[in-house]
Amino acid sequence: MKTRTKVVVIGGGIAGCSTLYHLTKEGWSDVVLLERNNLTSGTTWHSAAQVTNFGMNQTMVGLKKHSIELYRDLANDPNFPVNYNYADGGIRLANTEEQMDAYRHFTSMGRGMGVDFEVIDAEECKRRHPLISTDNLLGGWWDPHDGNIDPYQLCNALTGRAKNAGAEVYTDTPVTALDQYKDGTWKVTTHKGVIDCDIVVNAGGYRVNEVAKMMNMHHPVASMEHQYFLTEDIPAIENAGHRMPLLRCPISDYYCRQDKNGLLIGFYEQDCKPWGMDGIDPNFVNALCPDDLDRVTDVLEGAFARMPALKEVGIRNIVNGPITYTIDGTPLVGKIPGKENAFCIIGLRAGIGEGGGHGWLLAQQIVHGEACYDTWCLDPARFTSHTNVELTSLKAIEDYQNEFRFHFPHEHRPAGRSAKTTSLTPIMTENNAEFTVVNGWERVDFIKPTKDFKCTHSFNFDEAFSVVGKEVANVQNNVGICEVNGFNRFEITGEDTDSFIDRMFCGKITHKPGRVGLGYLLNELGMIKGEATIANIPESERGPKRVWYGSAAASELHDMDWLTQHIKQDEKVSIKSLTNNQTILIIAGPNSRKVISACSRENWSKEAFPWLSVRECFIGFSPATIMAVSFSGEMAYEIHIPNESLYAAYQSLTKAGTEFGMQIFGARAVESMRMEKGFLAWKHDLITEYDPFETGLNRFTNLQKEDFIGKAALQKRFASGLKKKLVCLNINCKHAPAPGGASLMDGDKVVGTISSGEWGYRVNQNLAYAFVNIDKAEIGTKMDLDLFGKLVEAEVMPFAPYDSNFSRILA
Ligand SMILES: Cc1cc2nc3c(=O)[nH]c(=O)nc-3n(C[C@H](O)[C@H](O)[C@H](O)COP(=O)(O)OP(=O)(O)OC[C@H]3O[C@@H](n4cnc5c(N)ncnc54)[C@H](O)[C@@H]3O)c2cc1C
């Protein structure tokens, strides 16, 4: 075995094989795959191996599209035979209008990604799949590219091509230890000896946490037992004259595809079973779990009802194997946060279909630092330390039980709730709060008018529409209070803090004590990496001169990794996270100055504390750090309170606020108001696929600055001119917000994609942000939004339509 290489990929299932192949495609040939047994001996060998293009967001559709194109290419390569039933087509069934609308939205999104999904009615479903009954069926979502592949041949073809390009594959080579040298490179110990490398990749499948343990860590991945069976031949299939399309059923929780002249049916039963929670037998290799068809009886009945022909045939074979789930059901593909030169491609629950694409995006990240699509939905940094084994398995069970039931907007499922709360959570509950969840934090979404008030899950405006409108109106006319927990907050200290920050941000950032600035971080390719406020806190009895870096909730590990990896060796900068120590209370509205003046002794006049100021003070007797910043477009104060004083500060503020009409407002009101004011949301409008000029952040970008990360690449992009531009749209419809990912059309041509959409209550307009082709960016340009399969007019309007001269913030 080699003793040195650039990358060691651990695991020879689809995840590892695809990564290895794509590393060679990206130009790295000195790469090695180590497999403890033989290729595919984990989960991959026994997979049902369906390959679909269905995806709930653009990144997932894009990566699956890549898988399909790659697999077709492999299947046509005579050097490595691969059986691929390509383009049998597949139907995802629906029995509610809400599901059908969602499918129409996913179809609109697919158009933008170059994939032609189709929404069909129940009769058409039956025409395409003659075995099904149309009882309790409204229709389905058709993927013309659905099919299935031989997973063993697939992995051999990928590694075969990789080996031809210079990669090496060692089977029967278990990795037993991982140690990091001082320079950040790795020592990989195996039964066959040691191999040193620059980068390691964990592709260990259900043994992910055995490998993670060698790095002293744990990933939020758990395994669930999953069963399918194969039937004997079915005469109706033999006589059909064409292959049956695939089926996925969110009504009764099964999938089904043709296998020989029978069917393969897989089940997602409610009475499901986590696997390997207390360790995995080292001899579980090319192995299966014991059959247990009793568990799936309920699901089976649903499948029988949909396909009566099933009742007539016997079972040929049963397969029960472990399948991995993450805490939100989407894999973890990318850099491992907090670890140098370590990546993972784990938690794949549909790894055969997706694996080609995941390996592609991972290899791009390893080689170029970023992939062609924004990969936040896959980023291992999207969860923080609360995601232990217990929480992961609770969410894995819930996800398994809802396999084909996608999340609707504003839907937060019950498992593993209250992972992160504050002393105000019970008070908000008493006030009838409906909660949303952000990285485990329970955040007020809105205040329900009654305790048992419920919203219908759909893509339309729901029953909370007018409730949220009232919260906005109270902020606009009086004053509102909003708890923002989990907001990311780092304290940056050290004598090189200012120059470090200058290098990290693409624009000018104030270093003036007592002042706050907003700025954007780019990656090396000149694309948007992050957004943060910088508050310069002067030296005080609470600490030395320091900077508070504030960014989106859930960005903690992502931003910490990015910042710390850019501190130069000789730079005196230290960064400490305060995310879990502080909570923000926002008070916003024309009466907010009166409220704050009533419970704090400072001078809050606009002369003494103008917009974008920061000061340390007390709210009542609670220590507070207050910033005059506004996301709502109203006069507002962001009050940062240490968690132990949060309850007391809240009491002081609400007592002072009563006479000024202060009421709680939640995240939905914030979302609406920020859109009216032209503020952007990280990982919606601010993504790695666009640069700051395309995102309209010219005033936050300064190419004359001496240096900043991404400057050289951005200069080149700037010189070649804009191709896309973020615009604000007025959507001519009243029943639904424009959903993220929906396509904007000019005739048959996709000319843009929605990034955010929400009703603007103060401007009384249905607002959306979208990235559009540059020739569609002029104010007044009209185009059509493909909204659930219907075209509605969308017109480009000025950004930030509410109070464009900032008179309310500056009052
Ligand atoms: C019953 C069933 C049906 C399924 N049907 C589908 C489907 O229709 N479509 C679909 O897309 N997906 C399906 N899946 C899921 C899919 O099979 C998996 O997502 C995929 O196979 C996971 O691949 P992997 O490479 O991540 O893991 P694995 O295939 O488990 O590979 C991991 C590899 O890492 C190796 N390894 C572990 N530890 C070490 C170590 N210390 N040193 C060296 N090597 C190590 C293991 O030996 C193993 O070979 C199904 C799964 C099951 C169980």
Image: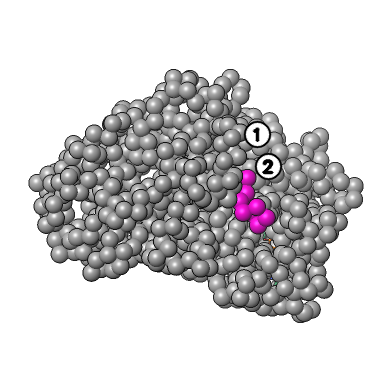
Q: The residue tagged with tag 2: helix, strand or loop?
A: helix
Compare residues 27 and 311 and report the one nearer the observer. 27
> What residue is pinned by disc 1?
114
Q: The residue tagged with tag 1: helix, strand or loop?
A: loop
Label 1: how many residues lie within 10 Å, few (<14), some (14-19) or many (20+)? few
Q: Is residue 164 magenta?
A: no
Q: CA distance from mark 2 to mark 1?
A: 9 Å
For ligand 1, which image quadrant applies? bottom right
Q: Which mark is residue 17?
A: none
Compare residues 65 and 633 and report the one nearer the observer. 633
Quarter holding the N terminus is bottom right
Residue 359 image offset from top left, x and y in percent: 69, 54
| Quarter-of-image position of residue 146 | top right
Q: Is residue 23 left or right of residue 711?
A: right
Residue 562 image offset from top left, x and y in percent: 51, 58
Q: Is residue 431 left or right of residue 74?
A: left
Residue lying at 35% horizontally and 59% vertically, measured from the top left: 548
Q: Is residue 712 left or right of residue 804?
A: right
Q: Is residue 370 magenta?
A: yes
The segment highlighted magenta reads 365-372
Tell me the kind of residue under disc 2.
Lys
Residue lying at 81% horizontally and 64% vertically, measured from the top left: 168
Residue lying at 27% horizontally and 64% vertically, measured from the top left: 539
Q: Does the numbered disc 2 mark a residue whose Cβ is under 8 Å from ligand 1? A: no
Quarter holding the C terminus is top left
Colouring method of the image: one colour
> What residue is pinned by disc 2?
65
| Quarter-of-image position of residue 334 | bottom right
In contact (CB < 8 Å): disc 2 and disc 1: yes
Compare residues 69 and 412 and report the one nearer the observer. 69
Tell me the kind of residue under disc 1.
Gly
